[in-house]
Image (cartoon, rainbow, N blue to C red):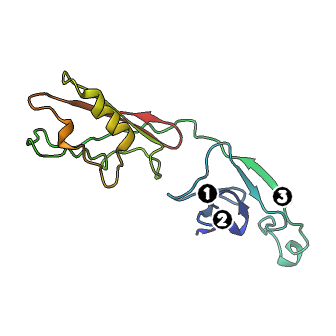
Amino acid sequence: SSFACSSFLVFVGSNIASCTWRDSANIIVYPGKDSLLLPGDTIKLRGSSLKAMCTTVAATCATWKYVTEVTVDVSAPAVVTIPSAVLSTVSVLGMCDDMVLDLSNSVGSGGRLWQSVRFTVDSLAPNASLIEDFLNNEYQMSPPTPVPHQYMFVGYKYFITANLCNFLLGCGD
């Protein structure tokens, strides 16, 4: 069963994280979606908070000493998840319609907010770079920021790609 990590551990966000015992010697930390814990950070086991699991009579176990303070570094996983950006929008816009680009079906964020979002706009339209600048500087994912219809030129096609990076710096289109 799970327990509050802050009972035994100190790290960024330990007050919102939950933990479980993997076995009698290892703890699994579930940082939670609002966590700021990153590879390179440290996790400290509070000194005098734990004893070894009792494997004999309670009277004997009562004489065992508490574990001393221990600090470990958080490491990134050996294989980082590469995001898959799913960009949804209409295929044809009316002259007065703003363009809404929805990335909410994208996967691979690692349960956290995206570290970064970068757009590329490919078009023969003379204003393609303006749309790209707007998306890269003004766009918010939730709710999606619409591209004003004044940015779109009639008769042109716009090919838009989104590149998403997660908190482990895995990036993908």
Tell me, yes or no, whether the two marked residues, 2 and 1, touch with CB atoms within 8 Å. yes
Residue at image coords 65%, 62%: 14
Image mark for residue 29: 1
- Which element type, helix, strand or loop, lies under badge 3? loop
Q: Name the residue carrying label 2.
A: 5
Identify residue type, mark 1.
Answer: Val
Relative horizontal placement of residue 32, taking residue 88 as reference (left or right): right
Residue at image coords 61%, 63%: 20
Cα gap from disc 1 to disc 3, whole angstroms: 18 Å
Q: Residues within 10 Å of mark 2 (few under 14, many from 20)?
A: many
- Which element type, helix, strand or loop, lies under badge 1? strand
Q: Is residue 22 or residue 145 the one in the foreground?
A: 145
First in residue order: circle 2 vs circle 3: 2
Residue 155 image point, x, y percent:
8, 29
Q: Name the residue carrying label 3.
A: 69
Cα gap from disc 2 to disc 3, whole angstroms: 15 Å
Vertical arrangement, residue 119 with respect to residue 94, above or below: above
Tell me, yes or no, whether the two marked residues, 2 and 3, touch with CB atoms within 8 Å. no
Residue 61 image point, x, y percent:
85, 72
Relative horizontal placement of residue 49, taking residue 123 as reference (left or right): right
Image quadrant assignment for residue 161: top left
Residue at image coords 33%, 39%: 135
Vertical arrangement, residue 52 with respect to residue 42, above or below: below
First in residue order: circle 2 vs circle 1: 2
